[in-house]
C-alpha cells in the first residue's frame, strides 16, 4: 500500500487552484477528503503527478440557507451533513442519504463534493441530487458555471466536470410544502456501497394526489438515473399501496442493470422495484405527515 | 452487547472470575509492539513480485530495469536460491500424499495467483513497490484447474505433471458394519454440502523481520506467527543454522485464526536475505497480498448419507469428501480434512461409519488450518444431515438429537474413529439452551408467523469438537506437549515464562490467574512472558484451542513444584515439619499455630540469599514443567439461532442467538465469552457472507475487503451466552479449550435456521454463504413461490 511518487500542491484560493489545474489538466488530481483517491493511489490504480489539496479553502466549507436555496460547500463532510441542524430542517433527505454512506470513519473524512466528483455508480449521493434538482456550481478558468444534477453524471465514474474545474458548491432549491422524501438502500455486504439505492420525493396536491413525483436510482446502472417511467405512472394518482407498487415495478425500465459477484443484473432489476416501492411508501407517508421530510 | 448469564461459581480467588485482561490496556491504547513497530537501523524493505497467472510457464524474467532503479539494493529470484533452499516440505501428510517441490520462489512455473516469483530489497517500501512495476515477466499460460470436482475428472489438466492425476492423497476410515446399517435402515437421507473456501483474515497480516548479528553468529527472526519454536526448528533445518544460534520472536501478534500456524515461503526467505545482505530486512504484508498468499480455510464438498430408523435412531453414516488443497500443501494442509473424518459422528451414538476423503490439487492458494480446522466441516455435515433426517421423519430437530446423544454415563466413550471422548453432558446442555431460547414458545411463534406468510426459522446445532492437542502418540506437529517456567523473583514478584504463543487469546491474564492462585500472590504481581525463543522454555505453539488446557497445566505444575519448595523453606525457617505448613493469603503458616508464619516474599528472599535453606536444597525459586496430556479434550455445546427471511429480497435477519457452550472448567468467564463471541462472528461470517471466489482463470475475484464480505459489528446480532461446566479428565485443571467452539457451533445453527424458515417451500438445503440473492433465487425457483 505505497503510492507512486507524486507532488503535493496546496493552493491558497479557488483561483490559484483552478489556474494550477488549467496548467496541468489530467496530470493533476484534486484532493478533498481522500476517501476514494488515496486508496486508489495506494493500490496504484491512480498515479497522478500532482495532488492539488483544496482541503483548507474556506470558501468551500460554507453552508447557507436563504428563502429559495440551500447552498452546501463542496468540502462539507458527510458526518456534518448527517448531523447539522440546518440541513435536518431544510433538507432531511440529504441528511438521511449521508447517514447511509460508508462507515463512521469514511463519513468523518469524506466530503459531498469529493463523492459527487468521483461519481461511483454505487455511491449514495447522486440519486438524491437528481431528485432534489440540485445545481452544481463549478469554478473554471473562465469563471463560474452551473451544471444541473441531471447533466452532471455522464458515465461510470465520469462527470461533466472538466479537468480544469473545481466543484465549489451544491445548490438545492427549496421544496414546497406537503413534500415527503426518502432514501432507502440495499447494502453490498462487503463494501457497504449500494446494490440499489432509491431516493424519492413526493409532493401532494390539495386533492391528496401526487402532484410531483421524482425518483432517483443508484447502483443499478453505470450512471445514476431518474426513473421517469415510475414518476409518470404515479403522477396525478392517489399515493396508495397499489399505485405505488404499480409505479415501482417500472424502476429499471429501459435500463440494462449492472451485474457482478454481489448481484446479478436480474436481481438488481428486481431489487430496484422492491426498494423503489419502499422508498415511495416512506416518502408518501412523510408527505402526508405534518412534519415535512 | 451480548447478554451474559452467569450460572457457575468461581473456584478460586482468581480462577473462575471475570478479570480484566492484562494485555488490553496495551493493545487498545496503541502501545502494543507488532513486527512493524520494531525498527532497526539500516533496514532494507522487501516487496514480492507475485504471479498474475494461476498456471503458467515463466518464459522470461527480466529484472534489469528494476535493478537499475535508485534505492534498489538487490533483487532475488528463484534462480538465486538453487542449491541454497529449494523446498519447504509440509508436516501433515497422508500415506499416499503426492508431495510436490514447494520452492521459496517460483523459477520456471507458477501454479496459483499470488505465488512469489521475486523479492525486491530496497531502501524504503515505496522504492520496493516502484521496482516491482519495472520487473518484466513473460508467461506462457497453461490450462487452469479451478473446481475440485472437475479436477478429478479423467483428462483434466494437471496441477503437477509429475502426479498421475489431481488426486493429491486419500484417507479412509471404516468402523462397524456400514452395509448392514444401511440395509436395516428405514430411511436413507442424503445430502451434498459445500463448505466453501474462506479466508482467516487476521487483523494484522503477515509480517517478518530478520537480522543477522555476524559477531555473535546469531540470527534473529521476528514473525507474526503462532508457532515461534516450530518456526525456529524449520528455519534451522532449511537454512542450516543451528537452533541455538537462531532466535525467533513472536511479538504482539494481531490475530491469526490458524493462518499463522505455518512456515511460509516469505518467512524462510527473509532470514536468508538478512544473512546474505548483512542488514536487517523487513516485509510487511498488505491486505491484498494476505488474501492471495496466506492460506485459506475449509473448501470441502461432502456427500453425506445417513441411515436412520423410522423412530429417528441413527444406524450409520457414510461420507465421501473432496477437499480442495490448492497447489502446494502447506504445513498441515493434508491433516486438516482428516479431522473432519474423525469427528464426523459428532455428539451421536452412530455404530457404523464410512468416511472416504480425497484431497485434490487445484491452481489456488493452499488451504490449511482456519479456526476450527476440520471440525466445523464435520459439525456442519452431521448437523445438516441430522436436520434433514428430522424433516424427512417429521420429527422435531431437538427430539432426533436427544434420541441419539451419547448419555453422560457412557463417558469415556470410544467413537467409531477410535477417539476417546473424555466427558460430556450433551442433553443437559441442549435442554438448558432450549430453555434459555424459549424453544417451545419459538415454535408457537413460528406457527403463527407461517400463517401470516412470514418466513421464520429456528436452527439448532449441537456440536462436540476436539481440542488440546494432544497426546504425543497421535503425532501432532512438534509433539503434543507444552512447557512453562514459573519463577518467584527475589522480591516475591512472579514471572511466568510460557512456551506457548498466545496472540490474542488472553493467556497473559489466565496464566497469571492460575499462578496467582497456586502461589497465593496478588494477580498484579504476576507477569507472563511468551513468544521469544531465547527467553522462554521450549514450546509447540498456540493452535487447536490447546493453550489453557496444555500450556496452562504446565504453569499449574510448575507452580505446584514451587509451592512444595516454598513449604520446605518456610518449614526450615519456622523450624516446624513441612507437613504442617499451609499456604494462605500470601503467607506460609503453621497449621497448628497460624501465628508462626513467613510471607511468600520472605521465603523468596531466603531462597535467593540461600543462607537458611534445608540441607542439600538448591537455591532459587524457579521451576519448569512439561505437560504432555494423555488424551485430547472434547468441548461441546448447543447453539440456537432464530431467523426471519425476507421473502422479497432474500435477506436473512437474525432475531435471536443463544450459545450454550461447555468448555469444562473456566479460568476466566470473560475471556471465554470473548472467544465464544469472536468464534460465532466468524462462524456466522461463513454462513452468511464470506466466500473466496476464484474465476475460471484462477483469478481471485474476492481479493479485497471491498469484495470479500467479512462481517462488521453492525452485520451481526446480539448473542445470549451461557455455559454448562463438565470438567475434562485429560488435565488437572479440568479445562477443555474454547477458541474455536463458536465458529464450530454457529455455522450449522444459522443454516439450519434458514432452511427451517424456507421449509414451507419444500427447500431442503442451501449452500453457504446464504447471500440475499441466493436465498431469493432459491425461493423464486420453487413453483410454490409463484
Image: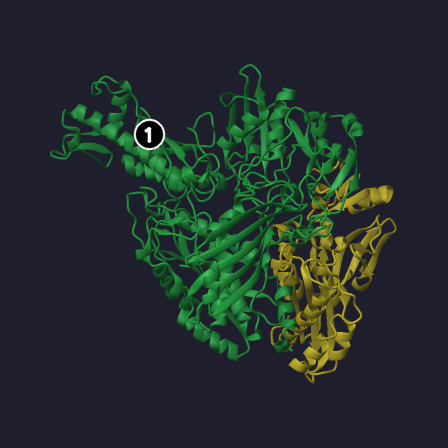
Front one among B465 and B452:
B465
- As drawn, is A29 to the left or to the right of B228? right
- Farthest residue toward the right? A142
The reply to whether residue A55 is in sight is no
Identity of the residue drawn at 32% across and 49% down: B727
Q: Is residue A231 above or below residue B176?
A: below
- Farthest residue toward the bottom? A207
Percent x, y of residue A183: 66, 66
Viewport quadrant of the C terminus of chain A: bottom right
Percent x, y of residue B761: 58, 74
Identity of the residue drawn at 76% across and 44% down: B142
Picture quarter containing residue B493?
top left
Identity of the residue drawn at 29% across and 39% down: B517
Front one among B185 and B555:
B185
Q: What scheme was used to colour the molecule?
A: by chain
The reply to whether residue B296 is in sight is yes
- As drawn, is A41 to the left or to the right of A151? left
Viewport quadrant of the N terminus of chain A: top right
Percent x, y of residue B18: 36, 47
Front one among B171 and B404:
B171
Name chain A's colour: yellow
Front one among A212 and B320:
B320
Q: Which residue is label 1 attached to?
A: B493
Name chain B's colour: green
Q: Residues within 10 Å of mark 1 (few under 14, many from 20)?
A: some
Q: Is residue B415 above or below residue B652?
A: above
Amino acid at each position: 500500500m505505497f503510492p507512486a511518487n507524486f507532488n503535493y500542491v496546496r493552493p491558497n484560493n479557488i483561483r490559484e487552484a483552478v489556474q494550477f489545474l488549467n496548467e496541468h489538466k489530467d496530470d493533476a488530481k484534486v484532493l478533498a477528503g481522500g476517501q476514494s483517491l488515496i486508496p486508489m493511489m495506494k493500490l496504484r490504480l491512480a498515479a497522478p503527478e500532482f495532488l492539488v489539496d483544496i482541503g483548507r479553502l474556506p470558501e468551500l466549507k460554507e453552508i447557507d440557507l436563504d428563502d429559495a436555496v440551500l447552498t452546501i460547500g463542496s468540502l462539507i463532510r458527510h458526518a456534518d451533513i448527517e448531523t447539522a441542524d440546518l440541513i435536518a430542517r431544510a433538507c432531511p433527505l440529504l441528511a438521511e442519504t449521508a447517514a447511509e454512506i460508508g462507515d463512521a470513519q469514511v463519513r468523518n473524512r469524506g466530503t459531498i463534493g469529493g463523492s459527487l466528483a468521483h461519481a461511483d455508480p454505487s455511491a449514495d449521493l447522486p440519486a438524491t441530487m437528481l431528485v432534489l434538482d440540485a445545481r452544481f456550481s463549478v469554478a473554471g478558468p473562465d469563471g463560474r458555471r452551473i451544471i444541473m444534477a441531471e447533466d452532471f453524471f455522464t458515465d461510470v465514474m465520469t462527470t461533466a466536470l472538466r479537468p480544469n474545474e473545481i466543484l465549489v458548491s451544491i445548490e438545492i432549491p427549496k421544496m414546497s410544502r406537503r413534500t415527503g422524501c426518502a432514501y432507502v438502500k440495499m447494502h453490498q455486504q462487503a463494501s457497504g456501497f449500494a446494490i440499489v439505492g432509491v431516493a424519492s420525493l413526493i409532493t401532494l396536491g390539495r386533492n391528496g394526489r401526487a402532484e410531483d413525483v421524482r425518483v432517483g436510482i443508484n447502483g443499478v446502472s453505470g450512471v445514476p438515473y431518474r426513473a421517469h417511467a415510475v414518476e409518470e405512472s404515479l403522477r396525478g394518482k392517489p399515493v396508495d399501496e397499489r399505485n405505488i407498487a404499480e409505479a415501482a415495478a417500472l424502476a429499471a425500465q429501459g435500463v440494462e442493470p449492472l451485474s457482478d459477484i454481489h448481484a446479478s443484473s436480474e436481481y438488481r432489476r428486481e431489487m430496484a422495484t422492491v426498494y423503489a416501492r419502499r422508498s415511495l411508501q416512506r416518502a408518501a407517508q412523510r408527505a402526508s405527515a405534518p412534519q415535512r421530510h | 452487547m451480548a447478554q451474559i448469564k452467569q450460572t457457575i461459581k468461581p473456584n478460586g480467588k482468581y480462577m473462575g472470575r471475570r478479570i480484566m485482561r492484562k494485555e488490553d490496556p496495551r493493545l487498545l491504547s496503541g502501545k502494543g509492539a507488532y513486527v512493524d513497530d520494531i525498527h532497526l537501523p539500516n533496514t532494507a524493505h522487501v516487496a514480492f513480485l507475485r504471479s498474475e497467472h494461476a498456471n503458467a510457464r515463466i518464459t522470461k524474467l527480466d529484472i534489469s530495469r528494476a535493478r537499475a532503479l535508485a534505492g534498489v539494493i538487490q533483487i532475488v529470484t528463484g534462480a538465486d536460491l538453487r542449491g541454497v533452499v529449494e523446498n519447504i516440505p509440509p508436516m501433515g501428510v497422508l500415506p499416499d500424499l503426492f508431495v510436490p517441490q514447494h520452492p521459496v520462489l517460483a523459477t520456471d512455473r507458477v501454479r496459483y495467483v499470488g505465488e512469489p516469483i521475486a523479492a525486491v530489497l530496497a531502501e524504503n517500501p515505496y522504492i520496493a513497490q516502484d521496482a516491482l512495476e519495472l520487473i518484466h515477466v513473460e508467461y506462457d499460460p497453461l490450462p487452469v484447474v479451478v473446481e475440485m470436482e472437475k479436477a478429478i475428472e479423467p483428462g483434466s489438466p494437471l496441477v503437477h505433471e509429475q502426479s498421475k492425476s489431481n488426486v493429491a492423497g486419500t484417507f479412509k476410515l471404516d468402523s462397524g458394519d456400514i452395509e448392514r446399517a444401511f440395509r436395516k435402515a428405514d430411511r436413507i437421507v442424503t445430502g451434498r454440502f459445500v463448505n466453501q473456501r474462506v479466508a482467516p483474515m487476521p487483523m494484522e497480516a503477515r509480517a517478518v523481520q530478520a537480522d543477522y548479528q555476524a559477531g555473535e553468529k546469531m540470527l534473529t527472526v521476528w514473525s507474526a506467527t503462532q508457532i515461534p519454536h516450530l518456526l525456529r526448528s524449520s528455519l534451522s533445518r532449511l537454512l542450516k543454522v543451528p537452533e541455538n544460534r537462531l532466535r525467533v520472536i513472536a511479538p504482539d501478534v494481531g490475530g491469526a485464526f490458524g493462518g499463522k500456524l505455518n512456515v511460509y515461503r516469505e518467512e524462510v526467505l527473509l532470514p536468508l536475505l538478512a544473512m546474505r545482505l548483512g542488514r536487517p530486512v523487513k516485509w510487511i504484508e498488505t491486505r491484498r497480498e494476505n488474501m492471495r498468499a496466506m492460506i485459506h480455510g475449509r473448501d470441502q464438498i461432502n456427500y453425506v448419507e445417513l441411515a436412520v430408523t423410522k423412530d429417528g435412531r441413527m444406524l450409520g453414516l457414510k461420507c465421501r469428501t473432496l477437499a480442495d488443497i490448492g497447489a502446494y500443501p502447506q504445513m498441515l494442509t493434508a491433516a486438516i480434512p482428516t479431522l473432519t473424518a474423525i469427528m464426523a459422528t459428532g455428539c451421536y451414538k452412530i455404530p457404523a461409519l464410512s468416511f472416504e476423503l480425497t484431497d485434490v490439487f487445484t491452481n489456488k492458494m493452499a488451504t490449511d488450518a482456519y479456526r476450527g480446522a476440520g471440525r466445523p466441516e464435520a459439525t456442519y455435515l452431521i448437523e445438516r444431515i441430522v436436520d434433514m433426517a428430522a424433516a424427512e421423519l417429521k420429527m422435531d430437530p431437538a427430539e432426533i438429537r436427544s434420541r441419539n446423544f451419547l448419555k453422560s454415563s457412557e463417558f469415556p466413550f470410544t467413537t467409531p474413529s477410535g477417539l476417546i471422548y473424555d466427558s460430556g453432558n450433551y442433553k443437559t446442555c441442549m435442554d438448558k439452551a432450549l430453555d434459555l431460547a424459549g424453544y417451545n414458545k419459538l415454535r408457537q411463534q413460528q406457527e403463527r408467523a407461517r400463517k401470516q406468510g412470514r418466513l421464520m426459522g429456528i436452527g439448532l446445532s449441537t456440536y462436540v469438537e476436539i481440542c488440546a492437542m494432544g497426546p504425543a502418540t497421535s503425532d501432532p506437529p512438534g509433539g503434543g506437549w507444552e512447557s512453562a517456567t514459573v519463577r518467584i523473583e527475589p522480591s516475591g514478584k512472579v514471572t511466568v515464562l510460557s512456551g506457548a504463543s498466545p496472540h490474542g487469546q488472553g493467556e497473559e491474564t489466565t496464566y497469571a490467574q492460575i499462578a496467582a492462585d497456586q502461589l497465593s500472590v496478588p494477580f498484579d504481581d504476576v507477569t507472563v512472558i511468551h513468544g521469544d525463543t531465547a527467553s522462554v522454555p521450549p514450546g509447540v505453539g498456540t493452535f487447536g484451542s490447546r493453550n489453557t488446557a496444555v500450556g496452562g497445566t504446565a504453569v499449574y505444575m510448575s507452580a505446584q513444584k514451587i509451592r512444595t519448595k516454598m513449604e520446605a523453606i518456610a518449614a526450615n525457617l519456622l523450624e516446624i515439619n513441612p507437613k504442617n505448613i499451609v499456604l494462605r493469603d500470601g503467607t506460609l503458616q503453621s497449621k497448628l499455630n497460624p501465628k508462626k508464619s513467613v510471607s511468600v516474599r520472605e521465603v523468596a528472599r531466603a531462597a535467593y540469599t540461600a543462607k537458611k535453606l534445608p540441607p542439600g536444597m538448591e537455591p532459587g525459586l524457579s521451576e519448569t514443567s512439561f505437560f504432555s496430556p494423555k488424551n485430547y479434550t472434547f468441548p461441546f455445546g448447543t447453539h440456537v439461532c432464530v431467523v426471519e427471511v425476507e421473502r422479497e429480497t432474500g435477506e436473512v435477519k437474525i432475531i435471536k442467538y443463544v450459545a450454550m457452550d461447555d468448555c469444562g472448567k473456566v479460568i476466566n468467564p470473560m475471556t471465554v465469552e470473548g472467544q465464544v463471541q469472536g468464534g460465532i462472528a466468524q462462524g456466522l461470517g461463513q454462513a452468511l457472507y464470506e466466500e473466496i471466489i476464484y474465476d475460471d482463470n484462477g483469478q481471485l475475484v474476492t481479493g479485497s475487503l471491498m469484495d470479500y464480505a467479512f462481517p462488521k459489528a453492525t452485520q451481526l446480532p446480539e448473542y445470549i451466552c451461557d455455559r454448562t461446566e463438565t470438567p475434562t479428565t485429560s488435565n488437572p485443571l479440568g479445562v477443555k479449550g474454547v477458541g474455536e467452539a463458536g465458529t464450530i457451533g454457529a455455522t450449522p445453527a444459522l443454516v439450519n435456521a434458514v432452511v427451517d424458515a424456507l421449509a414451507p417451500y419444500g427447500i431442503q438445503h442451501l449452500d453457504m454463504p446464504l447471500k440475499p440473492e441466493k436465498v431469493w433465487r432459491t425461493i423464486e425457483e420453487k413453483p410454490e413461490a409463484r
